[in-house]
Image (cartoon, grey):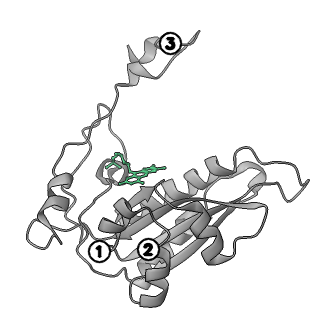
Amino acid sequence: MSTHIKHATPDFAVLDAIANRWSPYAYDGRGVEPAKLKQCLEAARWSASSYNEQPWSLILAQRENKAEWDKALACLLEANQGWVKHAGVLILTVAKKTFTYNGKPNRVAEHDIGLAMGNLSIQATALGLDAHQMAGVNLSVVRSTYNIPEGYDPVTAVAIGYAATKANAPDAELYERDTKPRTRKKLSEFVYAGSWGQTSPLVK
Ligand SMILES: Cc1cc2nc3c(=O)[nH]c(=O)nc-3n(C[C@H](O)[C@H](O)[C@H](O)COP(=O)(O)O)c2cc1C
């Protein structure tokens, strides 16, 4: 089981899996059980998407397959490779840029990738896993490594695995990063009503 050392401090009650989700840097090097991984992917599959386009494709690498693991890891920016190498699974996300039903640009394809990854992350947390999303991906390396065709864009990556404890962390510096408290803006800073910048009375 994950250690879940970084609960959120919600002002209003939220689902346990939302409060318990966080993005670790120190993973303990374990792989992810295939049954749990399939549940995470299933959660992504059932996300909402504009026109039910389901614009996501996911390139999956499990640490047990060293060749595939190294190939996917090499697509990340160096700073991310340093901690992701201890995770169990690495997924690269790819968005289809046009709608299948009319061929027009899908301006919310990346939004829908985000929804799918949100679902995946929450499912991972509910299963005792920990997921960490990344923008730090070398997009042109993803494209060439996996022969991504025109009309599809690599977008992000997500690492999944088990957060390390202090005792089994791969290195002290990574664990140290995980001890910093989680912070968020107040609702009053970003929930507006009436006009831009005017805080909604609901959250004042
Ligand atoms: C789209 C996206 C891209 C991110 N990119 C990176 C990244 O490249 N490297 C990294 O270490 N963390 C990355 N993060 C993780 C965020 O820094 C993290 O979610 C944020 O600090 C909030 O922390 P929490 O997830 O633990 O609540 C990314 C998160 C998201 C959603």
Check disc 1: other Cα within 10 Å, few if <14, some if 14-19, many if 20+: many
Height in image: 159 above or below 118? below
Tell me which residue sits at (42%, 77%) in the image. Answer: 36
Quadrant placement of the C terminus: top left
Q: Amino acid at mark 3?
A: Gly
| Residue located beneath label 1 in the image | 86
Q: Amino acid at mark 2?
A: Leu
Tell me which residue sits at (33%, 74%) in the image. Answer: 85
Q: Is residue 134 left or right of residue 143?
A: left
Identify the image quadrant of residue 142. Answer: bottom right
Asked whether residue 129 is in view, the answer is no
Tell me which residue sits at (46%, 56%) in the image. Answer: 136
| Residue located beneath label 2 in the image | 73
| Secondary-structure class at tag 3 | loop
Height in image: 203 above or below 79? above
Which of discs 1 and 3 lies nearer the camera? The answer is: 1
Percent coordinates x, y for residue 121 in the rendering: 43, 59
Which of discs 2 and 1 lies nearer the camera? The answer is: 2
Check disc 2: other Cα within 10 Å, few if <14, some if 14-19, many if 20+: many
